[in-house]
Each structure stands twice: as structure tokens, then as C-alpha cells.
Amino acid sequence: MLKSIFTWWNSATIGIRFTVARRGVFVGEDAFGNRYYEAKDTRDSYDGRKRRWVIYQGYADASKVPAEWHGWLHHTFDEPPTKAPLPRRAWEKDHLPNLSGTIWAWRPKGSIARTGERPKASGDYEAWRPE
């Protein structure tokens, strides 16, 4: 409970939850558990369109928003993915949030975070020597 009062990076604060309950309409939820809302009216809009927002499940990180919901949040699509899902191509991979700084981040060979051992240089490299 205290986390939701004092921190904004762990889901939503109590103030945001109050605003969502008062001013927003639930639109849908993605596979990560993020919940999406749209304002009931254009009262506090900048350009005459209803405001849209996301309440993150867990740590607030914008890279956790899948492409279809990102397009809806930015008014690229009028209908949310719950009503008009984007067609999925066979070559498309599942959405992954940014994994940098986590234990699942990619670590190349020779990285200190992996083993710290750099692979041997191939035979085409010749070190410079001052003459």
C-alpha cells in the first residue's frame, strides 16, 4: 500500500488510480497485464481528441507496451486492439520489452558480464610495432 502512495515507478499511484476511476473508461488489457484507458470526454485534451493512457503491471517501462497498443495510445489507430486486432504475419516475433540492465540482457562473447574471456584473435591481425 505504501508503494502506491509514494512511488510512481511501481504501477500507479493512488492519485492516478482515483483519476482513472473518475475520468477514464477501461478499454483493454495486453498479455503483460498492462491496462489501457480512454477519457470519457475531451475536457482536458490538447487537440480535441480523448486522452488515452496505460497503467503498467509492475515496473513502469514504456518498452513494455506492445506495438498494437502503442499505436492506439498515440491515436494511430482509432479502434483498440480488443475491437480491431492487427493482422499478424508469420515472420513476426512476439513483443519483448527492453531487457537491457536485466539478467536476460544479451551479453556477447568476451563481455565481462558473461565470462570475461575474450575469444582469440584470428590470424589476419598483426599488432602495430613502432619502428
Image: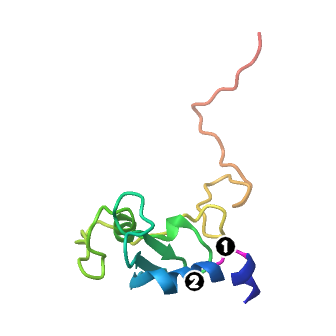
- Residue 123 percent location from the top left of the image: 59, 34
- Residue 116 percent location from the top left of the image: 74, 55
- Residue 32 percent location from the top left of the image: 48, 81
- In the picture, measured across the screen, residue 69 lies left or right of residue 21, that is left
Q: Is residue 88 highlighted in magenta?
A: no
Q: Which residue appears at 30% of the width and 76% of the height?
A: 81
For the residue pair 66 and 125, the one nearer the viewer reads as 66
- Mark nearer the N terminus (2 vs 1): 1
* Residue under pointer 2: 17
* Residue under pointer 1: 8
The amino acid pointed to by label 2 is: Arg
Q: Quadrant of residue 84?
A: bottom left
Q: Which residue appears at 42% of the width and 58% of the height?
A: 46
Q: Contact (CB < 8 A) between labels 2 and 1?
A: no
Determine crowd level at label 2: few under 14, some 14-19, many 20+ residues with C-alpha closer than 10 A: some
- In the picture, measured across the screen, residue 13 lies left or right of residue 77, that is right
Secondary structure beneath label 1: loop
Secondary structure beneath label 2: helix
Which quarter shows the C terminus?
top right
Q: Which residues are magenta?
A: 7-12
Q: Which residue appears at 34% of the width and 69% of the height?
A: 68
